[in-house]
Amino acid sequence: MSTTAPASSPWVIATRESRLALWQAEHVRDILSRRFGRPVDLLGMTTKGDQILDRALSKVGGKGLFVKELEVALEEGRAHLAVHSLKDVPMELPDGFVLAAVMEREDPRDALVSPHHPSLEALPPGAVVGTSSLRRLAQLRAKRPDLKIEPLRGNLDTRLRKLDEGQYDAIILAAAGLKRLGLESRIRALIAPSVMLPAAGQGALGIEIREGNPELAEAVASLAHLPTWLATLAERAVSRALGGSCSMPLAAFAQWREGQLVLEARLGHPTGTELVEATLQGAPADAAEADEMGTAVAQQLKQLAGPAWLAALHPAA
């Protein structure tokens, strides 16, 4: 089905219905409407990732569960674009779909949220920390093996409520979401990347469309932030080359320093406290060069981890 809308009709954004997802979609809606003088509507949807809260994402299909229903809406022509937290977007998109823009990044760091403890270092031995991210789990285990790490699912408001009910001593959340919703005061400490490296794409918004709508593609492309796009392309290439998903304890983060892109990645062991780390610096001018950087870093991680470690990460292989 064609997704090209008549010039007088609104563009429709498919979005999850969590408060954070709606903020993100409304942000893109307002920019597009203001910039192009055209109505933009929202199509709110509940995804399987929102519905399944009693199991880890790694056990039920991964973060792609947050985007599948939105892609169906695009394919059926009920929507023209979808706004995603880039870290939730699978590394490979289905045929006919493209990531048309990556917007300027918000704070990419993780944040400690706790009613009683001012920092990760200040948590007492045995403190209960909530996270369902294997990336965070692996880095917490390496840094603080004395902590008790418990699963934490649900949207941002649900996670904060569980903390406030006393189910956890602290939880780890993405700083970007808290800041976007005006909840920065809940952050007790921002966790430096040297301590906890972010996920690929963390803090950035990606806009997905169907192929075959050049007018929409051009409009969406005007929202892109090239430095963020190149950085996140390199990060995502690390994950793609390793077969990464939310079932892999992998972190990848790139930042620009004096015209150079510094790409760092860490891979955790599925059962132990070990981490391997790799870093590469370059000046990618386009997507292909950013992809090459990420692939090279992934190769470094593979060599450092070795066959047994890699096999343990893919037990079904």
Image: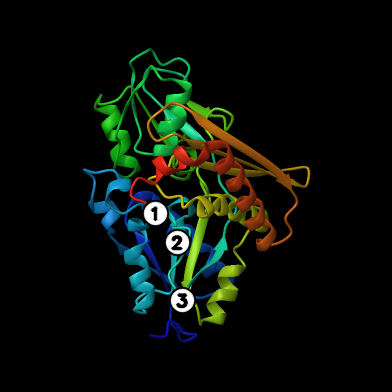
Outermost residue on the top side: it is 124
Seen in the picture, residue 131 relative to 12 is either above or below; the reply is above
Q: Amino acid at mark 2?
A: Val
Q: Earlier in the sequence, mark 2 or mark 1?
A: 1
- What's the residue at 31%, 54% (across, down)? 61
Q: Image quarter for residue 47?
A: bottom left
Q: Are the residues flagged by discs 2 and 1 in contact, CB closer than 8 Å?
A: yes
Say which label, 2 or 3, has the lower sequence index: 2
Visible residue check, residue 107? no
Q: Quadrant of residue 173?
A: top left
How many numbered marks does the figure carry?
3
- The kind of residue on which mark 1 rests is Ala
Assign a secondary structure to mark 3. Answer: loop
Q: Residue 96 got which mark?
A: 3
Residue nearest the observer in this picture, 211 or 41 = 211
Q: Residue at x 35, y 34 (%)?
A: 131
From the image, tell me which residue sits under label 2.
83
**Disc 3 to disc 1, C-alpha distance:** 24 Å
- Which residue is tagged 1? 21
Q: Residue at x 34, y 38 (%)?
A: 132
120 lies above or below 254: above
User: Which mark's residue is nearer the viewer, 3 or 1?
Assistant: 3
Give the residue displayed 74% in from the left and 48% down from the top.
282
Instruction: Residue 151 in the image: state x and y as whole percent.
Output: 29, 34
**Residue 191, how many percent across, how many down?**
52, 29
Q: CA distance from mark 2 to mark 3?
A: 17 Å
Using the rendered image of the protein, determine whether residue 85 is visible from the camera's viewpoint.
yes
